Amino acid sequence: MIVTVFRSRLRPGLRDEYVALVERMTALAATMPGYISHKGFFADDGERVTIVEFEHEEGMRAWRSHPEHREAQKLGREKYYLEYSLQVCTLERESKFKAKEAAA
């Protein structure tokens, strides 16, 4: 599995407009081969963290190079972001837990 962690800070006053673009990019990412999930969160201090999971590197590369996503990346640098960092990681180990639901 390939996990991408994208951390960013937005320019003031652009959050709602940016979220609309993110919604489009999330829908587009879901159409890429090997796509697993895509979630974004805003922290109290204004930082946004997005985590994207793909089954394989080929799918992540297809997403990274998709023309509409490339245009959104350019727009992000020119209009939306004060700063960002990107980490692409290969999953080495995974552990999961899910509590059983309480009996009715």
Image: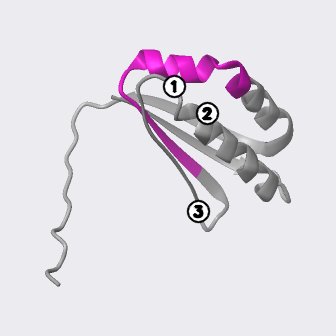
Of mark 3 and mark 1, the one earlier in the sequence is 1
Q: Residues within 10 Å of mark 1 (few under 14, many from 20)?
A: some
Of mark 2 and mark 3, the one earlier in the sequence is 2
- In the figure, is residue 54 to the left or right of 76? left
Q: Position of residue 20 (x, y in %)?
A: 74, 50
Circle 3 — which element?
Answer: loop
Disc 1 to disc 2: CB gap under 8 Å: yes
Q: CA distance from mark 2 to mark 3?
A: 24 Å
Q: CA distance from mark 1 to mark 2?
A: 7 Å
Q: Amino acid at mark 1?
A: Met
Seen in the picture, residue 99 relative to 91 is either above or below; the reply is below
Q: Amino acid at mark 2?
A: Leu
Q: Residue at x 80, y 44 (%)?
A: 80
Q: Residues within 10 Å of mark 2 (few under 14, many from 20)?
A: some
- In the figure, is residue 70 to the left or right of 6? right
**Between 81 and 97, which is closer to the camera in this rendering?**
97
Q: Position of residue 21 (x, y in %)?
A: 74, 44
- Which label belongs to residue 9? none
For the C terminus, the quadrant is bottom left
Look at mark 1 in the image and give the residue it sits on.
Answer: 32
Instruction: Confirm whether the magenta stretch covers residue 63.
Output: yes
Instruction: Confirm whether the magenta stretch covers residue 73.
Output: no
Q: Residue at x 71, y 19 (%)?
A: 67
- Which label belongs to residue 43? 3
Tell me which corner region of the image, top left, top right, bottom left or bottom right, holds residue 76. Answer: top right
Look at mark 2 in the image and give the residue it sits on.
Answer: 28
Seen in the picture, residue 84 relative to 98 is either above or below; the reply is above
